[in-house]
Image: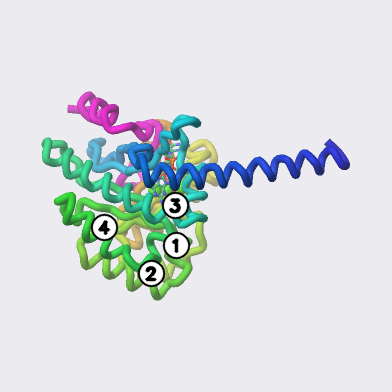
C-alpha cells in the first residue's frame, strides 16, 4: 500500500500494538493479583553430553490467559519488563521452580539443578538477595541446586555493581550462568572477572552446524574459548543429532534443545523422565 492508505494502515497497526500492550499489562496485573496460577512454569531438560543423562531443567514461564489461551514469554516478558511487573512475576517463577525441584528430589528423581531466568530488573533490584535467600529457605532446596541465568546485557549495564551482586549470590552458594552468550557485547576481560559457573551459548550459533563450515568453525572457537575460561558450557537450541555429535566431539558439557525435549508442563516432564533412558 502506498501513500495515504499506507500511512493509515501503519497508524492502525501501531494503535493495535499499543492497545495490545495495555491490554496485556492490565490483564497481567489482574492475573497476578487475583489468579496467579495463570502463570505456569514449563521445564526443559538439560542433558549431559558424556552420559546422555538429564542433569537438570530450565524453568520457562507460560501464561494461561483466560481469553487468549497459552501465551509464550516472548510476547509477555517484554511487557512485564517495561511495566516492572517482571519483579513479582519473576519472584513467583523463582519460588515455583525451587519448590518443584525440591519436590522432585524428595521423590527420588536424580535432577541436580533447576535453572531460573533473572530479568535485568530483578538482577539490579534491591531485594534480589532477600528473594533468593527467602525462596531457598521456604522451599528447603540446597543453594547449589539453584542456577540463576543472567544475560550479558544485564551484567554489562553496571559492571562494578554486577560484580558485587554476583559475589553475594556466589557466597550464598547458588550457581550462576551467563545466558545467551555471544549475543551481547561482553569483553573477555569482564567475563573472566565475573564469578560464573556456566555459559549458555545462544542458539543462533547452532544454526548451520555442521553443514556450514563457517558456522561450524565459529561454534568450535566459542567452545574452545569457553573451555579456556573454565566454565561449564551448555549449548542451546540443539535440534539435530549431527549437532549433538558436533558438540560431543568439541567437549561441550551439556545440551538443551528440541531434539532432546521441548519445554514441558510438570506432568509431561515427569512422564518423559520416566521413559527416558533407565
Ligand atoms: P531463553 O532463556 O534463552 O530460553 C530458551 C528458549 O529457547 C525457550 O523459549 C525455549 O523454548 C527455546 N528453545 C529451547 N530449545 C530450542 C530449540 O531446539 N530450538 C528453538 N528454536 N528454540 C528452543 P521460550 O520458553 O519461548 O522463552 C523465551 C525467552 O523468554 C527465554 O529465552 C527467556 O529470555 C524468557 N523467559 C522465559 N521464562 C522466563 C522467566 O521466568 N523469567 C524471565 N526473566 N525471562 C523468562
Ligand atoms: Ca535462559
Ligand atoms: Ca538462552
Ligand atoms: Ca534467548
Dot 1, how many residues are within 10 Å of its Cα: few (below 14), some (14-19), or many (20+)?
many
Of the two numbered discs 3 and 2 in the rendering, the one whose residue sits closer to the viewer: 2
Relative side of 220 to 109, left or right: right
> What residue is disc 4 on?
175
Sequence-first disc among 1 and 4: 1
- Element marked by disc 1: helix
Magenta segment, which residues? Answer: 249-278
At which x and y percent is residue 253? 30, 47
Residue 41 shows in the view = no
Sequence-first disc among 1 and 3: 1
Sequence-first disc among 3 and 2: 2
What's the CA distance linking mark 1 and mark 4? Answer: 17 Å
Mark seen at residue 180? 3
Sequence-first disc among 2 and 1: 1
What's the CA distance linking mark 4 and mark 3? Answer: 16 Å
Relative side of 248 to 2, left or right: left
> What residue is disc 1 on?
154
- Element marked by disc 4: strand
Identify whether 89 is placed above or below 129. Answer: above
* Residue name at image x 21 percent, y 45 percent: 99
* Residue name at image x 32 percent, y 65 percent: 127
- Element marked by disc 3: strand
Identify whether 179 is placed above or below 210. Answer: below
Of the two numbered discs 1 and 4 in the rendering, the one whose residue sits closer to the viewer: 1
At which x and y percent is residue 169? 27, 65
> Which of these two is toward me, 96 or 232?
96
What's the CA distance linking mark 2 and mark 1? Answer: 8 Å
> What residue is disc 2 on?
162
Contact, CB < 8 Å: mark 3 with mark 2?
no
* Residue name at image x 33 percent, y 69 percent: 165
Dot 4, how many residues are within 10 Å of its Cα: few (below 14), some (14-19), or many (20+)?
many
Sequence-first disc among 4 and 3: 4
Amino acid at each position: 500500500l502506498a501513500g495515504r492508505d499506507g500511512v493509515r494502515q501503519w497508524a492502525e497497526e501501531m494503535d493495535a500494538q499499543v492497545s495490545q500492550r495495555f491490554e496485556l499489562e492490565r490483564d497481567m496485573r489482574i492475573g497476578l493479583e487475583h489468579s496467579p496460577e495463570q502463570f505456569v512454569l514449563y521445564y526443559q531438560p538439560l542433558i549431559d553430553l558424556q552420559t546422555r543423562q538429564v542433569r537438570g531443567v530450565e524453568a520457562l514461564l507460560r501464561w494461561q490467559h483466560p481469553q487468549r489461551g497459552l501465551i509464550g514469554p516472548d510476547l509477555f516478558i517484554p511487557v512485564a519488563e517495561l511495566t516492572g511487573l517482571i519483579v513479582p512475576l519473576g519472584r513467583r517463577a523463582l519460588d515455583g521452580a525451587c519448590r518443584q525441584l525440591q519436590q522432585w528430589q524428595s521423590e527420588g528423581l536424580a535432577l541436580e539443578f533447576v535453572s531460573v531466568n533473572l530479568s535485568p530488573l530483578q538482577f539490579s533490584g534491591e531485594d534480589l538477595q532477600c528473594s533468593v535467600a527467602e525462596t531457598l529457605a521456604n522451599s528447603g532446596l540446597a543453594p547449589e541446586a539453584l542456577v540463576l541465568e543472567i544475560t550479558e546485557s544485564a551484567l554489562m549495564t553496571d559492571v562494578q555493581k554486577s560484580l558485587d551482586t554476583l559475589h553475594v549470590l556466589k557466597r550464598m552458594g547458588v550457581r550462576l550462568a551467563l545466558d545467551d552468550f555471544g549475543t551481547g557485547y561482553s569483553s573477555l576481560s569482564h567475563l573472566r572477572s565475573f564469578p560464573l559457573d556456566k555459559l549458555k551459548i545462544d542458539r543462533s550459533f547452532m544454526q548451520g552446524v555442521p553443514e556450514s563450515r563457517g558456522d561450524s568453525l565459529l561454534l568450535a572457537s566459542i567452545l574452545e574459548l569457553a573451555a579456556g575460561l573454565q566454565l561449564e558450557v551448555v549449548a542451546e537450541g540443539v535440534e539435530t543429532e549431527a549437532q549433538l555429535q558436533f558438540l560431543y566431539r568439541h567437549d561441550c558439557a551439556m545440551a538443551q534443545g528440541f531434539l532432546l525435549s521441548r519445554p514441558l508442563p510438570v506432568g509431561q516432564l515427569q512422564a518423559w523422565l520416566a521413559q527416558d533412558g533407565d
